Amino acid sequence: MSGQPIDFWFSIGSLYTYLTVMRIDRVEDVSDITFRWRPFSVRAIMVEMDNRPMSKPAKLEYMWRDLERRAVMYDSEFHGRPPYPLKEFDLVNRVAVVGATEGWCADFVRATYSRWFAERQDASTEANIATSLREIEQDAPRILALARSDTTGRAYDAATEEARQLGIFGVPTFVTGGELFWGDDRLEDAIRWHRTGTLKLKSPE
């Protein structure tokens, strides 16, 4: 798979995706691995599966604690629980779809997650989206208008359907060589598969 990117499927609003977003650039900096950022609506798929964290309090409580532990492990900022769920989930992800088309998706998603977790703001509101866009030197009014357009809506729906057809049921998910790896803790497995086509470790000689 040399020279090909790993598809990184995500939705802004996913708690565990924060961990991946804030460390994935380190992987690219120290290796030959690249990622293609694929925003879609995981919420639509999870609603279909009746698998929403808000409807499972014990699971959500575990997720918060697990997220905090892993954030410390990665030296990622975690200053208490940020607003959850995001109120304008679809709008912020449609902005990411525009970014994926224009080439600034990764910068926007990092700015958005930083605002959400480090500053504990609802990063999906129009005002906060605009601030994140200005931080990465993008024209907020133009992009917000594009995000609300029918063209972007169709692209967002098409990406969600593609994820559904791939069998994606949660995020973050990494896809390489026809294989799915679900969860931030599977990033390294996805990279190993991408390089070698197996998870088997080489036996010491």
Image (cartoon, rainbow, N blue to C red):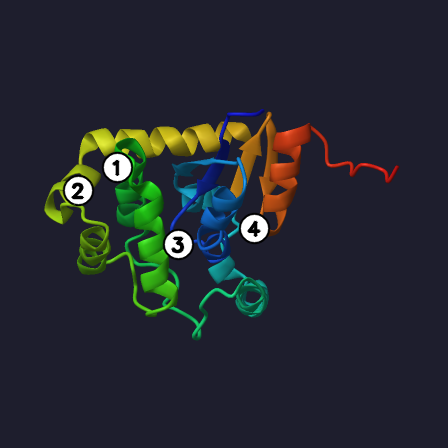
Q: Which comes before the other along the chain, label 3 or label 2?
A: 3
Q: Which comes before the other along the chain, label 2 or label 1?
A: 1
- Residue at disc 4, secondary structure: helix
Check contact, mark 3 vs mark 1: CB within 8 A.
no
* Residue type (three-letter) at the residue carrying disc 4: Asp
CA separation, marks 3 and 2?
19 Å
Q: Which comes before the other along the chain, label 2 or label 4?
A: 2
Q: In which quarter of the image is the C terminus?
A: top right
Between residues 169 and 204, which one lies in front from this camera angle? 204
Q: Which comes before the other along the chain, label 1 or label 4?
A: 1
Q: Residue 65: x, y in percent?
A: 57, 70
As drawn, the label of residue 184 is 4
- The residue carrying mark 3 is 13
Q: Which comes before the other along the chain, label 3 or label 1?
A: 3
Residue 188 quadrant: top right
CA separation, marks 1 and 4?
24 Å
Report crowding for label 1: few under 14, some 14 to 19, many 20 or more residues within 10 A (C-alpha): many
- The residue carrying mark 1 is 98
Report crowding for label 2: few under 14, some 14 to 19, many 20 or more residues within 10 A (C-alpha): some
As drawn, the label of residue 33 is none
Q: Residue 32: x, y in percent?
A: 53, 35
What residue do we see at 32% from left, 47% from top?
Answer: 107
Report crowding for label 3: few under 14, some 14 to 19, many 20 or more residues within 10 A (C-alpha): many
CA separation, marks 2 and 1?
7 Å
Q: Quadrant of the N terminus?
A: top right
What residue do we see at 20% from left, 31% from top?
Answer: 150
* Residue type (three-letter) at the residue carrying disc 1: Val
CA separation, marks 2 and 4?
29 Å
- Of badges 3 and 1, the one in the foreground is 1
